[in-house]
Amino acid sequence: MKRIIMNGLDQKIRKFNSCDKNQLVIQFVKFGLVGISNTFVSWLCYYFILWINADLYILGSIIGSILSIANAFFWNDHFVFKNDHNKRSGMLKRLIKTYISYGGTTLFSMILLWVEVSIFHLNKKFAPPVNLIITIPINFILNKFWAFKDKENR
């Protein structure tokens, strides 16, 4: 089992090393721009719910996450990872993978949010930006090499 995992990891590292580095940087910058819009959508929902009732900060985070992931899918599909295969074929599959990848890091981010606020008493207004440092690179890797991978990277 260990050998299978190591071989799979070795293949992924080779694929990453064989990528066009300029294209990778351009996609990461575009992904960052999309991330800014995702953050705006998410925080708009989060801070709106916080304004209504500060005790509902987790609900605000959930609503913001759902809407920002939909935003992320649209822009990543049309702007960041637009390849020949990114037409209608496979759109539902990419959408599901997008929700899974962002959902995983969002769940992790929400756990971090709870820990930061409940245990470390970080201000509820400042915790979400701290989490971005961790989730942005993870989301890029998951989207680039899984949700929106092109035929060349398979």
Image (cartoon, rainbow, N blue to C red):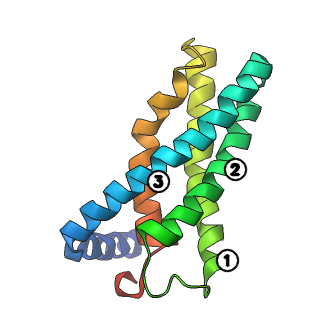
The answer to whether residue 47 is visible is: yes
Marks 1 & 3, CB-CB < 8 Å contact: no
How many discs appear?
A: 3
Q: How far apart are labels 3 and 2 at the CA level?
A: 15 Å
Would you name the residue on which mark 2 appears? Answer: 66
**Residue at disc 1, secondary structure:** helix
Q: Position of residue 110 (x, y in %)?
A: 62, 36
Q: Quadrant of the N terminus?
A: bottom left
Nearer to the camera, 39 or 12 = 39
Which amino acid does the dot numbered 3 rest on?
Answer: Val
Drawn side of residue 52 relative to residue 7, left or right: right
Marks 3 & 2, CB-CB < 8 Å contact: no
Mark 2: few, some, or many residues within 10 Å (few <14, many ≥20)?
Answer: some
Would you name the residue on which mark 3 appears? Answer: 34
From what the image shows, is residue 14 above or below residue 74? below
Mark 3: few, some, or many residues within 10 Å (few <14, many ≥20)?
Answer: many
Which amino acid does the dot numbered 1 rest on?
Answer: Leu
**Residue at disc 2, secondary structure:** helix
Which amino acid does the dot numbered 2 rest on?
Answer: Ile
From what the image shows, is residue 38 above or below residue 85? above
Q: How far apart are labels 1 and 2 at the CA level?
A: 16 Å
First of labels 1, 2 by sequence position: 2
Q: Quadrant of the C terminus?
A: bottom left
Drawn side of residue 107 relative to residue 11, left or right: right
Residue at 72% over, 33% down: 60
**Residue at disc 3, secondary structure:** helix
Residue at 43% over, 47% down: 136
Q: Position of residue 43 (x, y in %)?
A: 60, 34
Would you name the residue on which mark 1 appears? Answer: 92
Residue at 45% over, 38% down: 132
